[in-house]
Amino acid sequence: MTAVAPLLSIVAPCHNEEANIAVLCARASAAARAEVGEDFEIILVNDGSTDRTWRAIKDANASDKHVRGLNLSRNYGHQLALTAGLSAARGARILMLDADLQDPPELLGEMMRAIDEGADVAFGQRRRRAGETLFKRMSADLFYRGVSALSDFALPRNAGDFRLITRRVLEDFLAMPERHRFVRGMIAWVGYRQVAVPYDRDARHAGQTKYTLGKMVRFATDAITSFSTAPLRVAGMMSLFAFFVAALAIVYVLWSVIAGSTAPGWASVLTAVSFFSGAQLLSTAIIGEYLGRLYIESKGRPLFLVADTTDENVASASRLDWDKIRNALIAPPAARRAAGSD
Ligand code: UDP
Ligand code: MG
């Protein structure tokens, strides 16, 4: 066991961020020091980078023992890398931010104040997004609207994963076993008091965005299917509509027979067949998407594997501890709170 848990953990997932690590550590340390003195740790997760990011993390660890590194066995994606870092965090409060310095660590002070005043989550809300394309801003806007409309709880608009949370929110988050992790949604779902801290989002310090169009689509699909079964209802609604069209078609067919018109009818048949097969295929695809997710989840594989760490203390729970989860669920909230938060 380590001596005393640090007051503050700062967690950043890093994928090909070699040019950002040193600046990130410097700015994050300065911000942390201003708030909690020496009582902090910075956890950097190398998510299968193909550049020298892990080297940079090890260098940062060598020159500053506040920095601790986790090296994942391959690229698991932003949300799982973040989860890996969170599972290693020992702090009473945990700040998560991107490694590219789009989220200014200097906002920590304001976030700490919000938590001092009784909030459990202080999330950064973007007022302005510098250095991002019109397409990125428009797709992001559509995304927040879409997810909020489809899911059963409010997802804060224009908020990424930049947030300071208390220990109990972290424990609640880690107790959720799913692998398609939409971190900001899961944390919003937890509840308690969550407050927005507005800020201007900077451009990347160095390097390029790791979110390609394909990754953004996957991210949006994760977000929607994690919190909503609305697409399944769309499949249901479509079949109702198809039924309605089919009923009209039958009336038309009967009328044609009675009127004795011997129209060849291929157009209506073709229309009906293509409409129904389209509707069926789409419904099947939507159901298949959920079924596939159910299948993947049912395997219960570890969420990620850690290849190396900078020191032995960086233990991280990739395989979720079911006994702990069960106990957390059975234990009365008061006991959890006493064990968890500051
Ligand atoms: N990231 C990661 N694994 C990935 C992709 C991204 O750990 O597979 C990290 C990345 O290093 C950064 C954060 O996730 O710290 C956000 O990624 P990025 O800045 O590329 O996204 P954007 O800000 O453009 O949405
Ligand atoms: Mg970024």
Image (cartoon, rainbow, N blue to C red):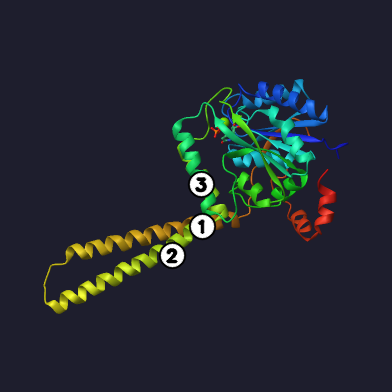
* Residue displayed at 60% across by 26% down: 17
Farthest-out residue, bottom: 258
- Please name which of the two marks, 3 or 1, marks the residue nearer to the observer: 3
Name the spot of residue 151 as percent of width and height, x first. 55, 54
- List x then y, in percent, for residue 103: 63, 30
Which amino acid lies under the numbered mark 2 shown in the image of this protein? Gly
Q: Quadrant location of the N terminus?
A: top right
Where's ligand 2: which quadrant?
A: top right
Query: In the rendered view of the protein, which quadrant contains the C terminus?
Result: top right
Callout 3 crowding tier (Cα within 10 Å): few <14, some 14–19, many ≥20: some
Relative to 259, 96 lies left or right: right
Q: Left or right: 120 with respect to 242? A: right
Between 8 and 109, the one nearer to me in the picture = 109
Residue 130 or residue 219, whichever sits in front: 130
Residue 109 visible within the image: yes
Q: Which amino acid lies under the numbered mark 3 shown in the image of this protein?
A: Arg
Mark found first going from the N terminus, 3 or 1: 3
Q: Mark 2 and mark 1 in contact (Cβ < 8 Å)?
A: no
Mark closest to the chain's N terminus, 2 or 3: 3
Name the disc covering residue 236, or none.
2
Report whether the residue tagged 3 is closer than 8 Å to ligand 1.
Answer: no
Residue under label 3, please give it.
145
Pointer 1 residue: 290
